[in-house]
Image (cartoon, coloured by chain):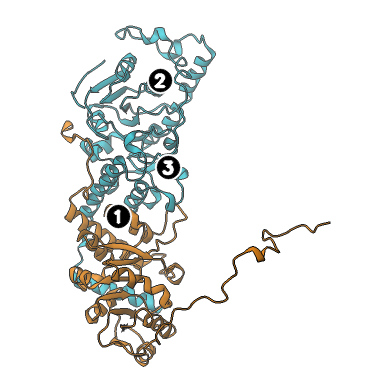
Amino acid sequence: MMVALLQVSGSSAVRRGTATRTVKKRSASSQAKTTLAPRQRVANRSVKRSPPTARPPILSRQSKVDREVLNLPSLRGTLSVIISARNEEQTLGRLLQQVSRLGPTEIIVVLNGCSDSSFPISRQHRQAIVVHCPESVGHDVGRAIGAKLSRGDILLFLDGDMVIPASQLGLFTAAVDGGIDVALNDLDPLMPSFGLCDDVTRSKLFLNYALGRYDLGVSSMTAVPHALSRRALETIGYRELIVPPKAQARSVLEKLRVEKVGTVNVIKHNRLRQANIGAGNAVEKLIIGDHAEALLEVLSRRDDGGLLNSETQREYRRQVAAWRNRI
Amino acid sequence: MKPKRTSARRTGRRVSRIKRRTSRPVRQVAAVPTVNHPNPYVSVIIPAMNEAKTIAGVIAGARGVHPRCEVIVVVNGSADQTAEIALSLGAHVISYELPLGHDAGRSVGAEAAKGEVLLFTDGDLVIPASGLRPFVTAVSGGADIALNDYSGPVRRLSPHPVVLSKHALNILLGRPDLKGCSMTAVPHAISRRALEILGSQSLSRPPLAHAQAVLSGLRVVAAHKVHVGKLNAVRRKEDGTDPLQQLITADHMEAVSLLLEHRGIRAGFSDGTRRREMVR
């Protein structure tokens, strides 16, 4: 099940740039024993395990978990979960547990320049396909690698630095299963007024406006979690996922169904690193550059509206001036 | 019983305070001339369309910006007395029967200007000289473009598209410090050097001129705040669209296009440590 596929390299992937608050981390032990008992984790992976429903409900917590699995709506399509991680030993194990509850067909963990125990932790998971890139491949490249390897009808993209409950992840997979091509995280309710927003947020808003989708607010493929349909991936091209805003621009321009489907507070839990704190940080600049690429995509697709010759342009401005003046 | 104090201000301590000046020293200002200076330092450019009600006030404010000053009023598409009033106040009036087009009056005025500093304002904005002088001072002090330090209302998450576009353009230009300040808004002043680099025609499409100015390495600063928001009412068509908004945001997209041509597809921002060749 385990593949050490590519020799790649250090600062993994990601949404972000927005976090300026203090991150509150739950203790690593709080959930560690809930879903999988240790003996199951070390079980021989080649042995087919009985389905979760057949497991005797020993612990009350465990049975609660099982009940929740049943409550999640079953998907018609197969699910691939793609997790990008960079030194996330604190959270990766618990995230994998939550992901398992979704009943995915495959879990692809792309370890981007990990030097901690993220690798052994992901290997312990019976289902995870691990792509270990000892050197950093850079932001968001892991997503594209994972997408290329995936086979599912629904692709759920996550970051290893944040444990999101399966019930919340289910929103995104269910939306794609129901016909949406790009299911985005709705961060609008978490945002302050425009005057207090950072440059990344403003860029996201402007891109959506330029795409004629101001209703999407600050929602962006830069942020996780988000889910794609197989159709979306094929239309966008997995390589374009390296630059998430560009992938988003292509999705809208290709008339895919792009919607915000639910809010997961990724700002509160976003891990603060050297590169993503403060205004004008490296990650912020990277993401703004991504938006420039996305806007180029918008500009290259626009119809003749943008190619008005100077005389038409002048005439239009005359009409606007006359109209404004007479009302 | 001592009466309870109801205000924060304490009484009876005046004596210990430094005695107040009875009057503020007033700077002696030369009498405002009513004609244009033959060799002006500042040219004030005022495009006007049917602004008979406000033009006198606008000119009065403009006259006070500098002792050597010329006022150029570009009257276009006006059916009222705008031109006559401006003429009677000694302005250089350039008249067009038909509307020149949105912001096109700025180019016409700039071509006629003789000053070292060009100050752009509008026929419907009555601004006192004290609100205009800082723009001239900024350009005299070495700035090439002195903008109105006004970003528009930003209290909501999704602001007006024009406000959004101005902010986004500045971010992409690598000048987030300018916030929503833009050559789209008046008043603003430019140096003669800036005019020569940008060309008078480009001033008709202010977002493009703005981007060009930053890309050319001109010194662009936010000089002074004049709250023009309340003075510029949004006018909509019956179907709810605002053609002016569409025009201005389209100009901003053109400006982004110009930026990308100059600085490359990422507008000069780094790609970080991405190794794109890992995915083929």
Q: CA distance from mark 1 to mark 3?
A: 25 Å
Outermost residue to the right: B1
Q: Which residue is mark 1?
A: B175
At label 1, the amino acid type is: Arg
Residue A36 drawn at (x, y percent)? 43, 13
Q: Earlier in the sequence, mark 3 or mark 2?
A: 2
Give the x, y percent position of residue A307: 19, 63
Placement of the N terminus of chain B among the 4 image quadrants: bottom right
Chain for disc number 2: A
Q: Judge whether A321 appears above or below A292 on screen.
A: below
Q: Nearer the viewer, residue A17 or A59?
A: A17
Give the cyan chain's letter: A
Q: Amino acid at mark 2?
A: Gln
**Residue occupied by mark 3:** A187
Q: Are marks 1 and 3 on the same chain?
A: no
Q: Which residue is mark 2?
A: A97
- Crowding near pointer 1: few (<14 within 10 Å), some, many (20+)? some
Is residue B125 among the parts visible in the rendering? Answer: no
Give the residue displayed 62% in from the left and 64% down from the top: B17
Tag count: 3
Q: Drawn colour of chain B?
A: orange
